Amino acid sequence: MRFNHSAALWQTFPELRAGALHATGIDADADLEAAITSFGAIAEARLAGAKEGEFPEIQAWRRGFSRMGLKPTQYRSASEALLRRFRQEHALPRLHPLVDLCTCGLARLRHSHCRFRCRKDRRRSRGPAGDG
């Protein structure tokens, strides 16, 4: 699989950091309860000290949204929206073990992400503002 961002995105946001993780063996029957609970405890501890809008990484997302001409408190990043929901409900929605793990990891790591299902035909995948 090949993943990339457009050159325009890198020009607009040179501080962007991108990475990839390849995981296998996570299907609908995977038991990830311990990891999800651990990530939830980390998010709870961070949110006990400050609201998500005060986190430096959320402020960076807000600046980025402003640079795109969006109102950052109207159009929240996925990180901020999930942290806000977690702070209010003390839980996150459960869909599928892989999605749940990514969502809880997002609440813990405070970074936005995207996930793709890889197929054997190795189709090219596009990230935000990707060109392929």
Image (spheres, rainbow, N blue to C red):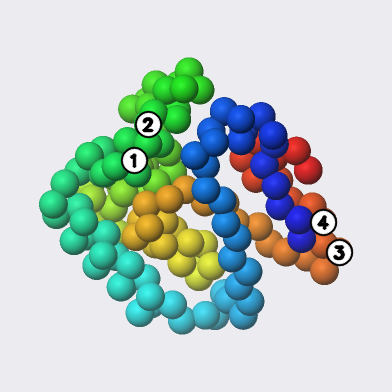
Work out how far the residue at label 4 is from the one at label 3, CA to CA, in angstroms.
6 Å
Residue plotted at (33% across, 27% down): 73
Taking the view exactly as shown, the residue that stands out farthest to the left is 49
Nearer mark to the viewer, of 2 and 3: 2
Q: Which residue is mark 2?
A: 62
Nearer mark to the viewer, of 2 and 4: 2
Residue 120 against residue 71 in the figure, above or below: below
| Residue type for callout 4 | Arg
The crowding category of the residue bearing disc 3, from other C-alpha atoms within 10 Å (few below 14, some 14 to 19, many at least 20), is few
Which of pointers 1 and 4 lies earlier in the amino acid sequence?
Answer: 1
Is the C-beta separation of discs 4 and 3 under 8 Å? yes
Residue plotted at (48% across, 61% down): 102
Question: Is residue 7 left or right of 77 when viewed as pictured?
Answer: right
Nearer mark to the viewer, of 1 and 4: 1
| Residue type for callout 2 | Arg
Which of pointers 3 and 1 lies earlier in the amino acid sequence?
Answer: 1
Q: Position of residue 41 (x, y in %)?
A: 24, 67
| Residue type for callout 3 | Asp
Work out how far the residue at label 2 is from the one at label 4, CA to CA, in angstroms.
32 Å
Question: Is residue 94 left or right of 59 when viewed as pictured?
Answer: right
Work out how far the residue at label 2 is from the one at label 3, CA to CA, in angstroms.
37 Å
Residue plotted at (78% across, 43% down): 132
Q: Secondary structure at mark 2?
A: helix
Please state which of residues 89 and 118 is positioned toward the viewer in this rendering. Answer: 118
Q: Which residue is mark 4?
A: 123
Q: Which residue is mark 1?
A: 58
Work out how far the residue at label 3 is from the one at label 1, CA to CA, in angstroms.
36 Å
Is the C-beta separation of discs 2 and 1 under 8 Å? yes
Q: Which residue is mark 3?
A: 121
Q: Position of residue 69 (x, y in %)?
A: 48, 18
